[in-house]
Image (spheres, grey):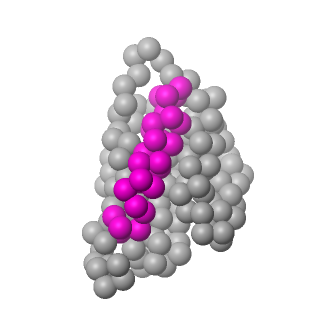
Amino acid sequence: MAKLFFTTSEQARIVEAIRIAELNTSGEIRVHIEAKCEGNPYDRATILFDELGMHKTNLKNGVLFYLAYLDKKFAIIGDSGIHEKVSQKFWDEEKELMVLMFKKGEFVRGLELAIEQAGEKLKFYFPHQKSDTNELNNEISFGNNNDSNHS
């Protein structure tokens, strides 16, 4: 199962990184993990972005980190509000950071650092307002593709 890729304590570290990144912004960050990704990970992440309701944020400032660990694929998707502000260069830098950490086997740290940087950009462009609410759950979501033979 995808839920077994990270230990419970590693999952808690990722969720805490999301919580901290969202403290000073109205932006929303999610992480979705599954075993396999048929085809292009960006296309899969786009589908998940909608399925997870990330397009429903008031300011269109959601960010999704998608990871398919058995296929060694991942993608980062930012909704239109944040994407208009940061440019493709920012997303490419985030991906490069994650690749560097993933090659070292530091998957949790790679996600933590990328989440932190996304949070900084969100904080800059979408600072926290008194009326802000946490629009999306911070918990990691997991794919249901059958990977039980790989656990």
Q: Can residue 78 be seen at all in this image of the molecule? A: yes
Q: Which image quarter: residue 101? A: bottom right
- Name the residue: 39% across, 36% down: 57
- Name the residue: 39% across, 74% down: 35
Query: Is residue 14 a member of the stretch shown in magenta?
Result: yes
- Count every numbered label the image shows and give the total: 0
The quadrant in which the C terminus is found is bottom left
Q: Is residue 144 left or right of residue 6?
A: left
Residue 23 vertical position relative to residue 56 in the rendered view, above or below: above
Q: Name the one closer to the observer, 64 or 18.
A: 18
Residue 125 x/y as whole percent: 61, 29
Q: Can residue 62 be seen at all in this image of the molecule? A: no
Query: Is residue 8 a member of the stretch shown in magenta?
Result: yes
- Name the residue: 41% across, 22% down: 132
Residue at the extreme front: 9
- Report the magenta residues as a range: 2-28
